[in-house]
Image: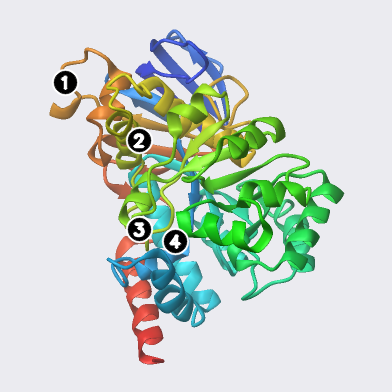
């Protein structure tokens, strides 16, 4: 499909780029022109959209989540992390079927779109169903391995790595395991060897709680970051989700190894895990991205809330109102996420890049006056401002409607049927 979006304000998210006025032309799944308005008589447009001076920018990248955990939204709240995980989450997850994961992931993809999220980095189980849900909804998903002591083998992770990296243009896969504290040393050593064999980065939950760090030190005499590094886990880089309780040595390792960090402020607040040292990480030049975490620990999948909390928590914890400015946060939510997820063709808006973009409605009270659009997005923006979300040149969400062929009420009905069946199983 050929689409022309004109009369637009455009934020490409290129370094030091200011907002420009003009148009974007899209042919198939790629951006073919971005700049001042021009009329191309040789192109037949399937759709021409008047942006009405609204903002076009890259879609947000949710760099850490567990999509199908929508079924646990508001199911086991107000509990400490370990009790929440072992006594509530794991027992319910044992009842999951392929059908259930499909519909739970479909629901999450819909919610992502309403928040301007056009790609997610998803660590969960039953990835075939998860991938199918993303392809059926036109959504871009990077799957992440999640092996632990409760299921999976390193051989299966390798098979998934090869399978899903040749599955569909919307789907890719990165090596990963759940966490040091859920995975025995033998498996961790095998995962490190797998990363070296494929010269690939490896991703995991890391240093989310003080207890996690203390337990690892008791087991191995090292923090999770230092222990995993001693196994050669990050020989080709990788990433850590959460990274709340990091020592200076941990951060030095991240800098040296090219380990990228994904912060999840809402989840860390809700589970009382703590506040990650974002400003310090930024000052060290370590790549940062933002994730919502799963809808059981957040509980919503809203990038606007995450962006505000990233900067707000740094300001209050450091007693410095200048800490982590809006531009840095926007970069984390777009370009930073793309880097973590390996989505080099989805990081900025430019000719030749995938047309993964959103339209932000500036004709709303919370976006006026237009003193500084970037700061408005981070400090006063909300899901109500998302007019449109496009992935690979296809409009999936526009003006409150989903446009990928599945009715929302059908999804809601299927989700509730699956949950009722799981609860009945006892």
Other residues around mark 2 within 10 Å, as few (<14) / some (14–19) / many (≥20):
many
Q: Is residue 217 left or right of residue 367?
A: right
The percent position of residue 27, horizontal first and vertical second, equals: 56, 29
Calculate the distance from the C-alpha at mark 4 to the C-alpha at mark 1. Answer: 34 Å
Badge 2 vs badge 3, beta-carbon distance below 8 Å: no
Other residues around mark 4 within 10 Å, as few (<14) / some (14–19) / many (≥20):
many
Badge 1 vs badge 2, beta-carbon distance below 8 Å: no
Which of the numbered marks, if any, corresponds to residue 271?
Answer: 3
- Colour approach in the figure: rainbow
Which of the numbered marks, if any, corresponds to residue 368?
Answer: 1
Q: Is residue 134 left or right of residue 4?
A: right
Badge 1 vs badge 3, beta-carbon distance below 8 Å: no
Find disc 4 in the rendering and name its residue.
106
Badge 4 vs badge 3, beta-carbon distance below 8 Å: no
Picture residue at 46% right of the left edge, 75% below the top: 86
Find disc 2 in the rendering and name its residue.
307
Comparing labels 1 and 2, the label whose residue is closer to the camera: 2
Of the numbered discs 4 and 3, the one sitting upstream in the chain is: 4
Instruction: Check disc 3 and report its element: helix, strand or loop.
Output: loop
Q: Nearer the viewer, residue 152 or 11?
A: 152
Work out which residue is located at the far right of the displayed protein and give it: 197
Instruction: Check disc 4 and report its element: helix, strand or loop.
Output: helix
Calculate the distance from the C-alpha at mark 1 to the C-alpha at mark 2. Answer: 19 Å
Comparing labels 4 and 3, the label whose residue is closer to the camera: 3
Calculate the distance from the C-alpha at mark 1 to the C-alpha at mark 3. Answer: 35 Å
């Amino acid at each position: 499909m050929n689409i022309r979006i004109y009369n637009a304000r455009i934020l490409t998210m290129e370094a030091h780029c200011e907002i420009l006025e003009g148009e974007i032309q899209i042919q198939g799944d790629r951006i073919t022109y971005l700049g001042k308005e021009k009329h191309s008589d040789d192109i037949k447009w399937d759709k021409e959209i008047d942006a009405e001076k609204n903002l076009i920018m890259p879609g947000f990248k949710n760099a850490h989540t567990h999509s199908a955990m929508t079924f646990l939204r508001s199911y086991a709240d107000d509990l400490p992390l370990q009790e929440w995980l072992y006594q509530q989450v794991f027992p319910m997850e044992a009842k999951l079927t392929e059908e259930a994961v499909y519909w739970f992931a479909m629901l999450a993809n819909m919610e992502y779109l309403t928040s301007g999220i056009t790609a997610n980095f998803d660590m969960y189980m039953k990835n075939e169903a998860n991938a199918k849900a993303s392809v059926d909804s036109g959504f871009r998903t990077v799957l992440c391995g999640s092996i632990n002591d409760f299921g999976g083998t390193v051989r299966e992770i390798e098979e998934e790595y090869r399978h899903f990296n040749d599955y569909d243009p919307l789907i890719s896969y990165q090596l990963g395991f759940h966490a040091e504290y859920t995975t025995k040393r033998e498996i961790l050593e095998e995962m490190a060897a797998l990363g070296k064999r494929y010269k690939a980065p490896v991703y995991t939950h890391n240093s989310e709680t003080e207890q996690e760090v203390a337990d690892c030190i008791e087991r191995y005499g090292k923090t999770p970051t230092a222990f995993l590094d001693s196994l050669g886990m990050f020989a080709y880089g990788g990433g850590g989700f959460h990274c709340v309780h990091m020592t200076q040595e941990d951060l030095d390792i991240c800098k040296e190894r090219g380990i990228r960090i994904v912060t999840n402020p809402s989840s860390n607040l809700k589970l009382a895990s703590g506040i990650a040292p974002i400003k310090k990480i930024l000052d060290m030049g370590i790549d940062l991205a933002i994730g919502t975490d799963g809808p059981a620990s957040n509980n919503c999948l809203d990038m606007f809330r995450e962006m505000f909390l990233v900067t707000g928590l740094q300001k209050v914890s450091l007693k410095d109102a200048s800490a982590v400015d809006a531009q840095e946060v926007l970069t984390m939510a777009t370009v930073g996420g793309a880097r973590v997820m390996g989505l080099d063709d989805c990081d900025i808006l430019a000719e030749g890049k995938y047309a993964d973009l959103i339209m932000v409605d500036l004709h709303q009270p919370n976006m006026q006056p237009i003193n500084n659009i970037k700061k408005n997005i981070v400090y006063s923006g909300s899901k109500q401002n998302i007019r449109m979300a496009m992935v690979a040149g296809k409009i999936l969400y526009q003006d409150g409607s989903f446009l990928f062929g599945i009715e929302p009420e059908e999804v809601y009905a299927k989700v509730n049927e699956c949950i009722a069946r799981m609860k009945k199983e006892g």
